[in-house]
Image (cartoon, coloured by chain):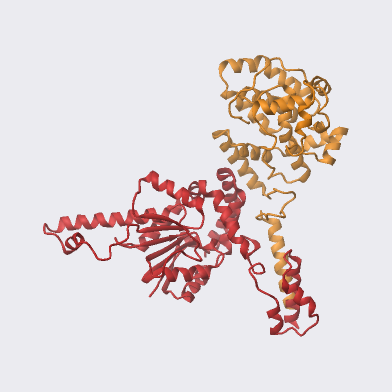
Amino acid sequence: RCRFVSGAFLAKTTLLVHRLFTSGAELTYSYDGLYPGHIQTTSFQKALLAVGSGVAALQDPYRHDMVAVLGETTGHLALINLRERMKNDPEGYTILTERPRIRLSTLDLEKMASLPDESFGREYLRFLEDNKVTPDSRAEVKFVDNEELAYIMLRYREVHDLLHTLLGMPTNMLGEVAVKWFEAAQMGLPMCALGAVLGPLQLNASRLQSLFTSLGPWALQNGRRARCVLSIFYERRWEQSLEDLRRELNIEPPPLTLSASNKRRRQI
Amino acid sequence: MAASVRLLFRRLARLSHKNITSSAATVSRRPGCCLGPSSSRCISDTAEDRSTHFGFEKVPEAEKAKRVYKVFENVAQKYDVMNDAMSLGVHRLWKDMLLHVMHPQPGARLLDVAGGTGDISFRFLDYILYQQERRKRRAAASSQTPSWQDISDKYPTEDRPQESRAVVCDINKEMLKVGKQRADSMGITSGLSWVVGDAEELPFDDDQFDIYTIAFGIRNVTHIDQTLQEALRVLKPGGRFMCLEFSKVTNPVLAKLYDVYSFQVIPVLGEVIAGDWKSYQYLVESIRKFPDQEEFKGMIEDTGFFCVQYFNFTGGVVALHSGFKL
């Protein structure tokens, strides 16, 4: 009589163990893994993903999901470093505990539009309108095997647009490269470094010149000395003036004013 | 006593799922009853209650079809590219072998179920064309006088063969769309038609087709036996059922390599090329859940097919099952 009980029990535990150690398919309503969207991967798979996504991203720069995957599979050490920096900063620590998300549903657009010019919220809204982008277009995190680090990765992606506003850079190629240089200097994510190196290859001569002479050095310097941009609780600072915020973060205003283009957003 | 414990365990497992059905209510009303055949009727067996496998996951039967639809909707655009990447082009050889074993003659009517992007149907039309060319050449080479075949061809036949010789049937509109685009780009204008249909309930009359094929589709259906029965129904007497599907690898070394490749590399390829890890995870899992060669042969025989046999390709990675309706 015990045979049947143990048989069924054994079958269930075997299935459970199997699902723990293989990257199981995900259910629609509940999820396998540490957070919604998480896919378990072995180191071998991560290595393959890094190489594959790198090649795919280089071949087709519009494949944002490949850039995202590359960032996730190569950024483990940098994410740990970022977590330490955020924990040591009081505001960063608050972010790690409260886990705010920047999406259209959480932003009060009317209130932000009514803010005075030169305030951070108003300038961010203007940036979204001028460049025709939305904060909801971020890929979800899939291959980071720690729930907190996955949040930091997500926060990094969501803060990217805010960085554009802070640095005054539009979403054309030159602006993106400048932001990437800043991010590479600040956060040390290998994906940013790769984008920083390969991005300039697509610029024409005059833009390259402005990059290397003024924008680039400015971005690198500010990246190194600025306060960790992930540690700022942006959602509570919409009313703050942009200049004030820049001073607090130790960021100089841009040496050149670039205008937003109507071209499709390139993201590196 | 053992049966009662097993039944209790099963009931507990059912209760732990979210779908509380009438069976649970019935059971609670009869505690401690002597569990015999009458009580097993209390445990109702509706579609929501019955579960099947979706890869390694257990899902209610009603849900499997929806989820499979979603998978193929997502991968349709990159389906052919992914096939080439995952099998390193070998899937073309498997499909060529299917046609070679099939050896269709001009005038044959093919039903290609789960035909999706049309690989089998295109090959079928090519093969028939080639056969026709061969015949013409042979007729021209043999003699100057026309053969009976040529004379009879010139007469209008009473039962004119239908214009569409190959029918591609698939439940998924996206896959059919991709197939149609391919046909257009290849310049195929006649002899092909595209039908949306469920393999378990085909929208065709009885005794319609000479050949029924289902290539890499039968492991995705919810009820394999129903699909086989439908195949029997729509085939003409003398018609042939052919099924190409992933199967069990017998050689243990190859099996291990195949497992490692399937679970480590294929989902990564899916993510990089098609941007969809989960669909390809489902694909490799569904292969493991499908019955092996002998078991599937038994299922085909049980349905009512005769002379059932199977051929292994690539050491058992793929098996071609064939049976006749007599």
Viewer-closest of B201 and A7: B201
Rendered shade, chain B: red
Q: Is residue B8 visible?
A: no
Image location (x, y in percent) of residue A173: 61, 24
Viewer-closest of B246 and B209: B209
**B294 left or right, relative to A31:** left
Residue placed furthest toward the right: A90
**B243 left or right, relative to B279:** left
Image location (x, y in percent) of residue A144: 71, 44
Image location (x, y in percent) of residue B315: 48, 61
Q: Residue at x 47, y 65 (%)?
A: B202
Residue placed furthest toward the left: B145
**B254 left or right, relative to A47:** left
Viewer-closest of A159 and B29: B29
Q: Residue at x 68, y 45 (%)?
A: A142
Q: Which chain is orange?
A: A
Name above or below for residue B10 compared with residue B161: below
Tell me the quarter of the picture where residue A202 sits.
Answer: top right
